[in-house]
Amino acid sequence: MNVQTPPEKLTAKDFASDQEVRWCPGCGDYAILKAVQMALANIGSRPENTVFVSGIGCSSRFPYYMATYGFHTIHGRAPAVATGLKLARPELDVWVVTGDGDALSIGGNHLFHVLRRNVDVNILLFNNEIYGLTKGQFSPTSRVGLKSPSTPAGSVDSPANACHFALGANARFIARGIDIQAKELGELFARAHAHKGASFVELIQNCIVYNDGVFDDFVSKEFAAERQVHVKHGQPMIYGKAKNKGLRINTQTLTLEAVTIGENGVTEKDILVHDEKNRTLALLLSGLRPPEFPEVLGVIYCDPAPSYETSVQAQDAQARAKGAGDLDKLMRAGNTWSVT
Amino acid sequence: MNLQAKPGRGDTASATPGLKADTETVVVRFAGDSGDGVQLLGGQFAQETALAGNSLATFPDFPAEIRAPTGTTYGVSAFQINFGSRVVKTAGDQPDVLVALNPAALKVNLSLVRKGGLVILDSGAFKEKDIKRAGFNQDPRTDGTLKEYRVIEIDISAQALEVAKPFGVSQKEALRTKNLWTLGLVSWMYDREMASTQSYVARKFGEDDPVGKANAAALKAGHAYGETHEISGDISPAHFPSVKFEPGTYRLVSGAEALSWGLVAGAQLAGLELLLSSYPITPSSPILHNLAKLKQFGVSTFQAEDEIAACCAAIGASFGGKLGITASSGPGIALKTEAIGLAISTELPLVIVDTQRAGPSTGLPTKTEQSDLFIAVWGRNGDAPVPVIASRAPGDCYEVAIEAVRLATKYMTPVILLSDGYIANAAEPWKIPSIKDHAPFPVTFRTDAEGYQVYNRDPKTLARAWVKPGTPGMMHRIGGIEKDSVTGNISYEAANHQKMTDTRFAKIDGIANDIPEQTVEVGDTKGKLAVVGWGSTFGPINRAVHNMRAKGLDVSHIHIRHIWPLPRNLEALLKSYDKVLVAEMNNGQMLTLLRSQYVIDAKGLLKVSGQPLKIAEVENAIRAQLDA
C-alpha cells in the first residue's frame, strides 16, 4: 500500500497514494491535489517527513490521496491537532487542509489561534463558498442572497473574508490562488512552504455540484484578464489584457482605486508597487472584490516572525540545559521527614 | 479545658463498646473571608502537623469566587484538618475546634461543629455591621447562639495590627498578618514546631521585606499569646505523639501534585516525552501549573485555546510519537468527547484526567462530586469503549497515573483517569515512592516497513503498531472515518464496521486480564453486606466499615480502582454477599453500572451536596442495610 524507498528525485506521482480519488468529476479539488503533489516534488519534500492534517468536508479527504503521513481528524479541529503534532515533532513538514465551513465556521476558533501563535504549518483553505459534503447549505463565505436548502429565501448572513480573518489573527503569511491556475499555485505552495511560521493560503475553488460558477465573475475566460491582479513583491500592481490597468492609492481616503493607465492623466508611475511586508496594504488588497476591483492573487502578505514551536523548543531546551530532571529528587524536595 | 477531642465525633470509635473514648485525634476547622489567607494558614498548619509525625487528612473548602465582597457568607473560605496519633482516613465528620475569623465564617460553619466543641473568634471582626452583613439579627456571642460551645474570644485583628506596627507596613498589610497570628496561637495549642512556617515566610517575602518581618512577628506573637495570656488558665496545649508509620521518607502531598508526578513517572517508564495540553479549569488547573515547571523531565505543556483544542493537540502529539495528555474537569470533559472518539477510532494513546467537580453544567466548580462516571464510561457518540480508572486518595494519584500511562501505551487507547476536587486539593502524609519501584514498560515504535498495515494487531493485546511520522517507507493515513480492518483505508463495508466495532470492544475488554483481581479492603470475601466504593469515598467507607466491624457487624469494604473494564472476579465477589451497598457522591452512577453489568440488586448511599461523604452517614447506611 505504501510507496517504497523513493528514488532520489521525486516526481508528483511519488506523492500520490494508491487510493482512488473520490471527489465529484470536475471538482476544483483535483487540480489543487495535482498542484500540491507537483509542488512537493519540486520543493524536494520527502513523503516520510510530510504530514497532511485535515478536518471534515470534501477538501478534508485530501490526506488519503497523498502518499505521505496523514491524519483526517474531526470537524474544524485540524489546526489544533497540527499544533500538537508540531509541538511534538517540530522537524516535520505539516500541512493543514481545510474548507470554508471547516476553517471559518466550526473551526474558526482554532484557525484564529494557530495563526495568532504562528505555528509553522501550511494552511490550505479551499474556499468554495458552500457546504458540499452535507449537500449544499450556505457557508460562512457564501454571498448574501444565496439560495440553498437551508436558506430557501436567500442567505442573509454577512460573509467572512478569509484573508481579513487571517490578518486579524496576525497571520504573517497570506496568499490567495485559484484552483485551475496550476503554475501560480505551485509558486504559492513553494512560498508557503519556505515561510517559517503559519502560512495561510486561500484557494478559490469551484464546487461543480452545489455552487458552480460562483467565481465566474473573475475566474471565467471572459473576465480573467480584466479582473485578476497577480501581485508580486516590488512590482507595480498592473493587470488587464492590455496591461493598462492598475491599482492606485488614494491618500486622502486611504483606499485603493482601480485605474486605467492613459486615462484621466494616470501614468504607470501612479500605480502602486506591491510591498508584501506592508500589513495595511495587505488589508486593502485582500478586501478588493470584483467587479469594481480585480481579485488580488499571489502572496499578499509575508512578514516573518518567530514561530511558536521554535519559541516553545527554546524554553524547553533552556530548562533541559541544566540537566535531565531526577524525579526521585524532585519528590523529596521541600519538607520531608523520616520514619525509621 | 483540654483541647483533645471529646467522644461523639464521627471519626472515632467512641460509640464502639470495648474501645476507650477516643482522644487520639482532633478535627480543627479554620474559616474566614476568602481574602484572609485561610488556605495558607491551614496548609502551613498541616505541614507542621505532618512534620510532627502525626497522621492527618485535610479538606480545603472554598468558594468559586476569588475575593467575594468582604464579610459575606458566600465569601467564606474554610480549611479543615483531622490529625492525631493514630491513622486518620478522612478530614473528619465534625470539627472539634472552629477558628472563625469573622461573623460570616461563624454563620456558615457553626452548625458543623460538635456540640461542646471549642469556638475561637476574632472579636475584632465582630462589629455591628459585620454581624449584620453575615446575616445575624443579633450578636451571636450574646444571644445564646453559642451556648452549646466553649468560646474563646480574642481580638486577633487588634493583636495583628499592634504586632505589625514597628515594621511600618500599611494598615491593610498589617491586618493580613491575622492568619499567621492565628497559626501561631494554634501551633501553641497543639505543641507544634513553627520552623517550617518561619522558613516559608522567609522564602516568600525575603529576609528584609517589612511585610515578611511583620508576618514572622505575628506568628511568634500568636504563639506567645497562648503561652502567656489569660487563656493559658483555660486551655493547655495538647500533644499528640507521632503515629507509627511504616519506615520511609515522607512528605505531605496533594492529589494534584501526586498525579502530576505520576504522569511524569509513567512517561519515563514508557520511555516517552510527554505533552500536557490543557485549558484552565477548576479544579484541574494545578496539574497544568505543576507540569509547566517540569520541562527538564521531557515535559512540554500547551495551554490551548479551548478544551477541544487541548484534547486535539494531545492527540496530535501522540500521533507524532509523544505521550499526549489532557487534563480537565466535567464541563471540559464534555467538550472533549468527540476528540476522545477520534483517539478511540485511530487507536492512539492518550491520557484524559478528569478532576471531577459538582455538576451539571458549571455546577459547583470548587466542590467535589463523583458524577462523571457515566460520561467517562459511556459518554461518547457511537460504541466507543475506553478504560476508566479512579484514584482513591491524594497519594494514590501517583500510582493511578502510572497505570493510566501503562494502559494507554500498551493498548494504544485513550484512558480516562478520574480524580476529584477533594482528592486534588486535599493533602496527606505520603511515603515517597521511587521511580525504581516500578518495572519499566518501554514503548516500541515500529520501524519495519515489511508487511506493515495500519491495523496489523498484536495478537495478545489487539493493539495496533505505533509508527512515528518521519519513518521511511511506512507512510500511512489515519482518521475518524471507519477504516478497513487491515489496510486502514476508508471502508463503508457492513461486515468491516461490525468487525472493527467488535475488535475495539475486545481490545478494551481484554484489559480485564491485565489488571489485578478485585480485593477486599476490610472484612471477609463473603457475608451479609459489602459496601462498594470508588474514588475519594475510600476514607469514610473504610473507617465506617472498620467501626461497624468492631461493633460485631458483618460488613466488608470493596473499593474499585478499575472502573472499565471491571476486575474479572468482581461479579462473583459481589454475588458472594447477601447485600451490596454502593456508596458514592453522585445520584447512582456506579450503582447503575454494577446493576446493569451483573444484574444484582445493589442499593445506594448517594450524596450530592458538594461535600465529602461522612463516616457517620456510611455507618447509618450500614446499620439500615443490616437491620432491614
Image (spheres, coloured by chain):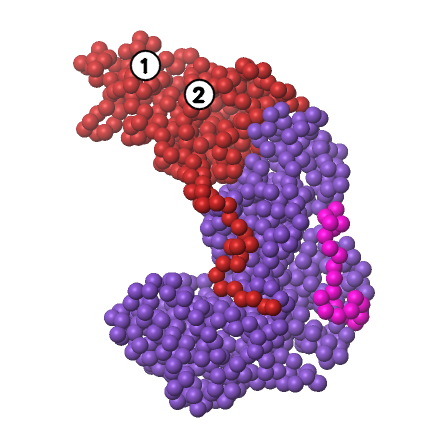
Q: Which residue is mark 2?
A: A190
Q: What residue is at 42 percent from the left and 42 percent from the top?
A: A318
Tell me if mark 1 has few (under 14), some (14-19) or many (20+) residues whose alpha carbon lies within 10 angstroms of its own: many
Judge left or right: residue A49 versus residue B99: right
What range of the chain is rendered magenta? B510-530
Image coordinates for residue B463, horizontal then vertical, percent: 70, 39
Secondary structure under the numbered disc 1 in the rendered image = strand
Residue B322: name its quadrant. Answer: top right
Q: Which chain is red?
A: A
Residue B512 magenta-drawn? yes
**Chain of the residue under label 1:** A
Q: Which mark is residue A239?
A: 1
Q: What residue is at 75 percent from the left and 57 percent from the top?
A: B517
Residue B34: name its quadrant. Answer: bottom left
Judge left or right: residue A87 versus residue B247: left
Tell me if mark 2 has few (under 14), some (14-19) or many (20+) residues whose alpha carbon lies within 10 angstroms of its own: some
